[in-house]
Amino acid sequence: MTDTAPGPALGEPRLSLPLCILLTAVLALTGCGEPRPYKETRFMMGTLVEVSVYAPEKAAVQAVSRAFDRMAQLERVAHAGHEDSPLARLRRGEAVVLEGDLARILEAGMAVARASSGAFDPAMGELVDLWGLSMDRPRRPSDGEIGEALARKAGLALPSGACCPGGAPVWMDLGGVAKGYAVDMAVELLVDAGVASGVVNAGGDLRTFGRRPGRGIWKIGIQDPDSPQELAGVLQVGQLSVATSGDYQRYFEEDGVRYHHILDPATGYPARSGLRSVTVLAPDCVTADALATAVFVLGAEKGMKLLEGWPGAEGVLIKEDGTVLLTGGIGDGIRFERAGKGIRDQG
Ligand code: AMP
Ligand code: MG
């Protein structure tokens, strides 16, 4: 395998569901002749999660298993699909104490919601369900259904303190931020367990830690939205988090129209901002995850502004016409090399 060859997970088949879910969105690449990491892959949080670590095998097996357990626990907390999860209880109008992991995920999401003037919106639960995007039952809702859900969302007060007293249903959806948090927590656990270096990759929301043996830096492939089996470019980074939001990751087609999974909170429809893919780099993955979703909704101009003003964040944006936009800090310790044919650079 060469440096820029796709990682083994690239050939994973897409699910044969009406809703196409690309199982890997960004890939951590390994080169030939380098020490091999210990790797394990599981399907969770609606995607393939790969944990790859450099450590003696016995310690690696134990630490990786605990990292997966931690992510499974977070999936139960942050996904409304689990009947007993706080999110499911909020949807039933039950009283819920917001604390621990859930409070931290919501706090990270709310920070990006405020900075993006609501382009990232943790209150999209009813609309996400209406489009069937978190399930394998996608459908195009009627304009009336979307209008009614938008009106209900406008009247919805998201919990602002530790206590959600119950009463009116609260349709929270943390799908745009929870994977990033799970990646952060898995990395924290691996580091605490003494693992020197590795990558946790939850379907493209990933975090590297430590120095990659051999070359020191990590190479991360960004997929070409037109042809996700190929790369649009490769990032070279040190310890960093990277998250990608793209219209090719999860979508369905009806009457020849493609509907993807990132909704514009202002319209209730899949965002049409002129972007096809947004990759955000940030010190932590929960922030990278929420920012990537927000920038996708905001579009190139406002999205670049948000990233340029966010401490420690950088981005690679791919527009519908194939133009690639890079924030100012790329090239400064973080390298980006274009790979795709027809991708034009405006960095
Ligand atoms: P991501 O793939 O991280 O961009 O997140 C997309 C997921 O977040 C969707 O599958 C929904 O669960 C949820 N979502 C969709 N639109 C938004 C939005 N505008 N703000 C916050 N979450 C969203
Ligand atoms: Mg996201």
Image (spheres, helix red, strand yellow):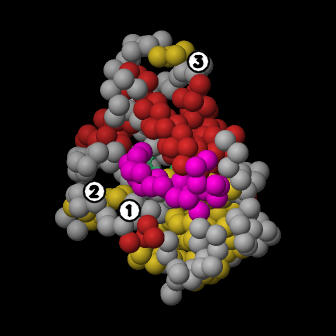
Residue highlighted by disc 1: 22
Q: Is residue 42 magenta?
A: yes
* Numbered badge on residue 162: 3
Residue highlighted by disc 2: 19
The yes-or-no answer for disc 2 within 8 Å of ligand 1 is no
Instruction: Using the image as rendered, state which of residue 187 and residue 161 is in the foreground.
Output: 187
The yes-or-no answer for disc 3 within 8 Å of ligand 1 is no
Q: Is residue 30 above or below residue 153?
A: below
- Disc 3 is placed on an element classified as loop
Crowd rating for badge 3 (residues with CA inside 10 Å; few <14, some 14–19, many 20+): few
Residue 39, horizontal then vertical, whole percent:
52, 58
- The numbered mark, 2 or 3, whose residue comes first in the sequence reads 2
Can residue 9 be seen by looking at this rendering? yes
**Residue located 58% across and 49% down the image:** 58
Q: CA distance from mark 3 to mark 1?
A: 36 Å
Q: Quadrant of residue 53?
A: bottom right
Which residues make up the magenta segment?
37-59
- Disc 1 is placed on an element classified as loop
Instruction: Using the image as rendered, state which of residue 295 and residue 251 is in the foreground.
Output: 251
Position of 34 compared to 74: left or right?
A: right
**Residue located 37% across and 18% down the image:** 93
Residue 88, horizontal then vertical, whole percent:
37, 26
Q: Amino acid at mark 2?
A: Leu
Can residue 226 be seen by looking at this rendering? no
Instruction: Using the image as rendered, state which of residue 294 and residue 333 is in the foreground.
Output: 333
Marks 3 and 2: in contact by CB < 8 Å?
no
Q: CA distance from mark 1 to mark 2?
A: 10 Å
